[in-house]
Amino acid sequence: MTRRIDVATVGLVLALLIAVVGLDLSGHHLFVVSGASMEPSIAKGTLAVVRSTVPAALAVGDVVTFQHKGATVTHRIAGIDEYGDARAFRTKGDANEVADPEPVAFDGEVGLLVAQVPLAGYLLGLLQAYGRIASIGLALLFAVSLLRERRALPFPFPARA
């Protein structure tokens, strides 16, 4: 039974790593929504999956994630102003009464929301905060488990007389 749990745990961790690497290689990125400006459509603590796209592909109503004054913002496009070949986007949080004060001109690529996982952002935050401690602890438990199976030692170490 313990062996099945070990294999299942390793399999789950590998599947998650493959999924995250696969998302990154396909141009998708993960962001945690840290504010309530998009509620109720996107709650605080939601894990947002965004796909990189060019500004020309965006339309009014799309939800985008972008960097603005050093902060990551996830808002809906409320309007688009055309200036020749350039575009400026007016964004607005769904919970906000008015649009954001400054239009945004995306340089290069911008993230278009393609999926969201409510509350998963809190889990990701915990993993980032305590990930090193947890990974060291898991590595130690895995090593002790391997030693016990190989040498048939009692957990965690043999008693000395």
Image (cartoon, rainbow, N blue to C red):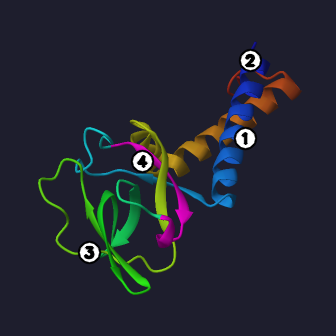
Q: Are marks 2 and 1 in contact (CB under 8 Å)?
A: no
Which quadrant is the C terminus positioned in? top right
**Mark 2 burial class by Cα count in 10 Å: few <14, some 14-19, many 20+:** few
Q: Select label 4 or label 3 by which is in front.
A: 3
Which quadrant is the N terminus positioned in? top right
What is the spatial separation of the Cα atoms under label 3 and label 1, in whole angstroms?
42 Å
**Mark 1 burial class by Cα count in 10 Å: few <14, some 14-19, many 20+:** few
Q: Is residue 41 above or below residue 88?
A: above
Q: Residue 143 at x, y = what percent?
A: 74, 38
Q: Earlier in the sequence, mark 2 or mark 1?
A: 2
Helix, strand or loop under label 1: helix
Q: Select label 3 or label 1 by which is in front.
A: 3
What is the spatial separation of the Cα atoms under label 4 and label 2, in whole angstroms?
29 Å
Kindly identify the residue that appears in the image at 55 percent across and 63 percent down: 52
Kindly identify the residue that appears in the image at 67 percent across and 27 percent down: 156
Instruction: Judge left or right: residue 67 versus residue 95.
Output: right
Q: Is residue 58 above or below residue 42?
A: below
Q: Earlier in the sequence, mark 3 or mark 1?
A: 1
Q: Is residue 8 above or below residue 125?
A: above
- The amino acid type of the residue labelled 2 equals Thr
User: What residue would you read off at disc 1?
Assistant: 14
Helix, strand or loop under label 2: helix
Nearest the viewer among 125 and 21 is 21
Q: Residue 146 at x, y = what percent?
A: 80, 32
Magenta segment, which residues?
A: 45-57
User: What residue would you read off at disc 3?
Assistant: 103
- The amino acid type of the residue labelled 3 equals Pro
